[in-house]
Image (spheres, helix red, strand yellow):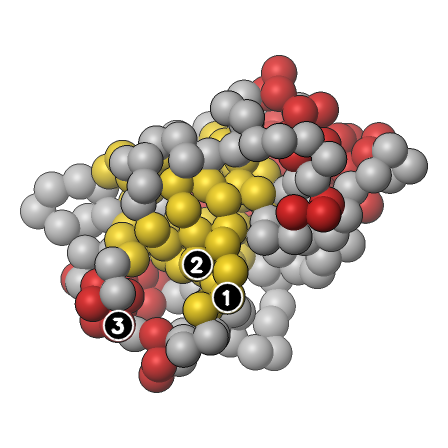
Amino acid sequence: MSGPIVMLPVGAKGVDYVHPAVNHTPQWMVENGYSFACRYVARTSRIGKIVTSAEVHQLHAAGIAVLLTYEGSANDVFGGAQAGAAHGAFAKSFAQKLGYPLGLPVFAAADTDVTSSNLGQAVAYMRAFHDAVHPYTLGIYGDTLLLAALADLSPVGWEPQARSWSPKEPTGTVHIQQQALNKEASVDANLVLVSVPAWLVQ
């Protein structure tokens, strides 16, 4: 076996999705040119959102690399430092139990429009998440305003498809960019703009 860390090259395509389904199996991903999957960590889920070790094994067996994202709800990020610390600690523990290699990015999701009026709460959340999730690297799923405000932390940036949330053009802070929904399989497509590490045991 080789790995467990690979570098996703510029131009690599990936998917993110809420739960595994018949129409976007690992084999379907391979056949459609996807080489990585972003999957979710959360405390609870009623819809199968949380990634499992069995799913990771299936993805790896097909040659699909994995990245992890913490998201309980779209408004997590407005919980400030207290929420960021709690969520970062949970995400770290979950990732370790899953076998996710240390040093890889664990994304915290800001799946909402961050504006000047709520930026302070979002920044406090992400800074606390960063400290709690260490030695994993901070990844941020969020708009370019938030990414720019946290540039000193050198986060791995993942920009949502909702470009109206982003007042700035993508820069070096955006490593992965979410593309349009692939309606055939009900997954969001993603494109690597700056090479990033991911988990793949081969």
SS for dot 1: strand
Q: What label sits on residue 181 in the rendered view? A: 1
Q: Quadrant of residue 152?
A: top right
Q: Is residue 142 left or right of residue 33?
A: right
Is there a contact, CB below 8 Å, between mark 3 and mark 1?
Answer: no
Tell which of 122 and 164 is nearer to you: 164
Which element carries disc 2, helix, strand or loop? strand
Identified by mark 2, the residue type is: Ala
Residue drawn at the location 65% of the way across and 52% of the way down: 162
User: In whole angstroms, how far apart are the C-alphas of marks 2 and 1?
Assistant: 6 Å
Residue 189, label in figure: 2
Mark found first going from the N terminus, 2 or 1:
1
Image x and y of residue 87, in percent: 65, 46
Number of numbered callouts drawn: 3
Badge 3 amino acid: Trp
Disc 2 vs disc 1: Cβ atoms closer than 8 Å?
A: yes
How crowded pointer 1 is (Cα within 10 Å; few <14, some 14-19, many 20+) is rated as some
Q: Residues within 10 Å of mark 2 (few under 14, many from 20)?
A: many
Q: Amino acid at mark 1?
A: Leu
Residue at 47%, 75% (x, y): give it. Answer: 183
Dot 3 crowding, Cα within 10 Å, few <14, some 14–19, many 20+: some
The residue carrying mark 3 is 28
**x%, y% of residue 80?**
81, 39
Determine the residue positioned at 58% across, 39% down.
140
Q: Position of residue 46 (x, y in %)?
A: 61, 78
